[in-house]
Amino acid sequence: MSITCVIDLSKLVIPNKTDSISGRGFGEGIAEREKVMQHLEQNDKFIMRIDSKKVKAINDSFIKGFFSEVFRTLKSRQRVREVFELDASDNFKRLFEKNWAILEAINAAA
Amino acid sequence: MSKSYVTYKGDSSQTRQAKRSFRARISIQKKRLERQAQHKVLQHELTLIRTAAESPVRYDKMVQRFCDVNNMKLWSKKRSRVVIQLSQDFNLFNNPSKVLRDLLYLLYDAKVYQGYPTIRYIDKVCFGALYLVDNMCWEIANHRLWKVTLQNMPASEHVKFAKVRSFESSDYDTEAACMVNERVHINRKGDDLSNQSYRTKSKQLRDMVAVAIAGAEDPNYELPFDAAQAIDSAISEQFDNVIQHVPNANQASLCAFYDKVTKELTILIYNFGKTIAETLLPKNLPQPVRGEVEDIIRNHTKRFGFLIGSNFTQENALTLLALQEGISSKLLTDDTRGHGLIDYIEKCFELQPLCRIAIVSGRTAIKIDQKYPISLKNVLNRPRRILALNEDNDIYAKPDKTYVRTMDVAFNGVIIETTIPLIY
């Protein structure tokens, strides 16, 4: 039976000290820590939560680091959207969509 | 020749003989004097070379490497004390060679001469260049007694120089400007999830800029999303590159300066280590990309005839290629790499088309402004964001030679200066 996992990115910032999430290695590390690929094999779904009051910026490398393996499995943006629900502001949604489009193009060309 | 030594028709054979012999003696003497003068110059040059080589002033390993790659050991030109002129010209965007050369002169003079340099204000202080000068001054001051003389410096600019203090973490906030300065330690303890201190500085800078923009009127003012993203990206993508591509670098310098009068934010990040081109050697690229990259390098470095065609080097081409989407030395293991620089450049220009970016690495200096925008092109098997810096935005064609330049000095690392006008 598939389950829905919640990944709260707001927990990655240190209140009053940091308010941004960045780094390719950090993205890959979080995906690994949250066992994203294992959950995908089980057909689980995800809710990615970003509290805009706590997180002010996420850099593209973090998103690409997090989703690079995901796109190798799911291939298309459509499939990723079905599995990953973004509980975030429209700004962050646009940011994720832009990076997903790039990852989709890379996988389509491979 | 004096008239009296010229042989005349009426001169007796004895007189002629005497004049000839006198002329010969004069000539020999002249040659001897010339030789002596040459010898003296040579002696002086040798003394300077020896003084520089034997100078007790020893710099930090990477700063010393900066001197060595520019053959400072062989410098022997006698110079008066260094005078650095702070003018519109003295900046990394338009004149990186001049800035780096003056840094080298500073380091050289500190080794060879007892005197101190003068920093003369002409018409403008460009923050990135000033920060580098300050950095080198503190480096010298670690090894010998050192001071600088400031000339014609207006009080408002004097404050900048006094407050930079690039040798330690510092920040300041005055009526005219605010600044964040940090020698950022790179955390490589195998735990990428742990906190990197550049993130703290990114927040501190954005908070400062927000307060500067809103003033006291709106204490809850927050930077718009795109501005926060662009500023954070300018910092985080650079540091991510250092973490990913320069394994020996333990730290990188970050300095950001917001001028409240011009409303311009300048972010300067530099690190010593490998140059961009050194990390992107074609042998590190997967086969299909390598072939295309080699084609591009060939096109860029090609000359027509002896003097026709611009003299772009392989290093120029590789540094420019590193800015393009999906070109990275890590492609062999992961085909989704190579987006950091183009992502950050795109974000800055989306926020403000009047942005200016200067990238200096090795002997290559690249400047980016609104003249040549990024566009999507079908290159290397898929659509990619390309910044070719020429009219057609064609990466296979040579870039504008005023935008991609070969410098007469080299920097053993990477300097990236981003200037963002924050006008709302």
Image (cartoon, rainbow, N blue to C red):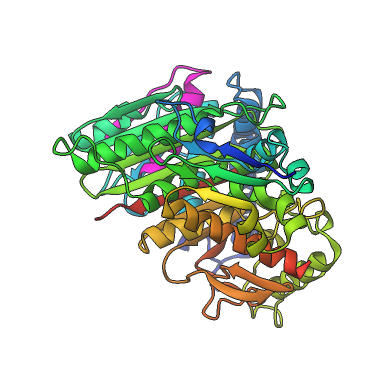
Q: Residue furthest front?
A: A1
Q: Position of residue B264 (x, y in %)?
A: 30, 49
Quadrant containing the C terminus of chain B in the rendered view: bottom left
B30 horizontally vs B278: left or right: left
User: Is B141 a magenta residue?
Assistant: yes
Q: Is residue B216 left or right of residue B73?
A: left
Q: Is residue B139 visible?
A: yes
B137 lies above or below B17:
above
Tell me which segment is drawn in magenta. Answer: B127-154
Query: Residue visible at 25% across and 37% down?
Result: B211
Q: Is residue B223 above or below residue A16?
A: below
Does the segment drawn in magenta span residue B170? no
- Camera-side residue of B201 and A96: A96
Q: Measured along the vertical axis of the image, is residue B215 above or below residue B337?
A: above
Question: Nearest the camera: A18 or B246?
Answer: A18
Query: Is residue B267 or residue B106 the one in the foreground?
Result: B267
In this orientation, which residue lies closer to the viewer: B110 or A19?
A19
Image coords of residue A75 (percent x, y): 73, 62
Q: Residue at x 28, y 40 (%)?
A: B210
Picture coordinates of residue B355 (x, y %)?
39, 58
